[in-house]
């Protein structure tokens, strides 16, 4: 996936924290070619890399590419890779 844009390391850490603590959260994301954002309320299960991109697994097993995340609860993810070059992964 050559068009994947890594998220900031701090945002990745927040995702990992929510997974470890198993706290319910609200996630807003928008996949490519979708006109409207979608939202998810529930627990986050895992983050992992595959095929050159990073993914978040939701409670029902659905996968969301990390660069599609717009917001996690009150935390804005939009433009995170553009605003800071400090990413966790290379």
Image (cartoon, helix red, strand yellow):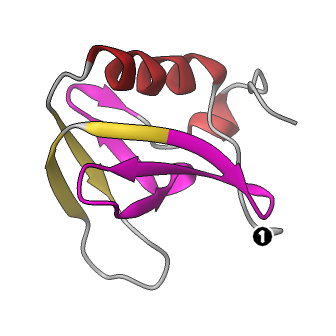
Q: Give the residue displayed 53% in from the left and 40% down from the top.
A: 47
Residue 5, given in percent of the width and then of the height, sits at 70, 51
Q: Is residue 34 above or below residue 45?
A: below
Q: Is residue 55 above or below residue 14?
A: below
Q: Nearer the viewer, residue 26 or 43?
A: 43
Residue 49, given in percent of the width and then of the height, sits at 70, 48
Let me know if residue 54 is in the magenta part.
Answer: yes
Q: Give the residue displayed 63% in from the left and 27% down from the top.
A: 8
Magenta stretch, residue numbers: 47-76
Residue bearing mark 1: 1
Residue 59, given in percent of the width and then of the height, sits at 25, 49
Q: Is residue 52 above or below residue 1?
A: above
Q: Is 46 displayed left or right of 29 in the figure?
A: right
Q: Give the residue displayed 26% in from the left and 66% down from the top.
A: 37
Let me know if residue 67 is in the magenta part.
Answer: yes
Q: Quadrant of residue 63?
A: bottom left
């Amino acid at each position: 996936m050559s068009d994947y844009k890594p998220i900031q390391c701090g945002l990745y850490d927040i995702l990992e924290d929510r997974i470890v603590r198993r706290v319910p959260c609200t996630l807003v994301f928008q996949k490519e070619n979708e006109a409207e954002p979608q939202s998810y309320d529930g627990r986050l299960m895992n983050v992992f890399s595959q095929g050159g991109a990073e993914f978040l697994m939701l409670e029902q097993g659905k996968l969301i590419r990390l660069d599609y995340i717009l917001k996690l609860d009150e935390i804005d993810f939009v433009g995170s890779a553009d605003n800071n070059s400090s990413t966790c992964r290379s």
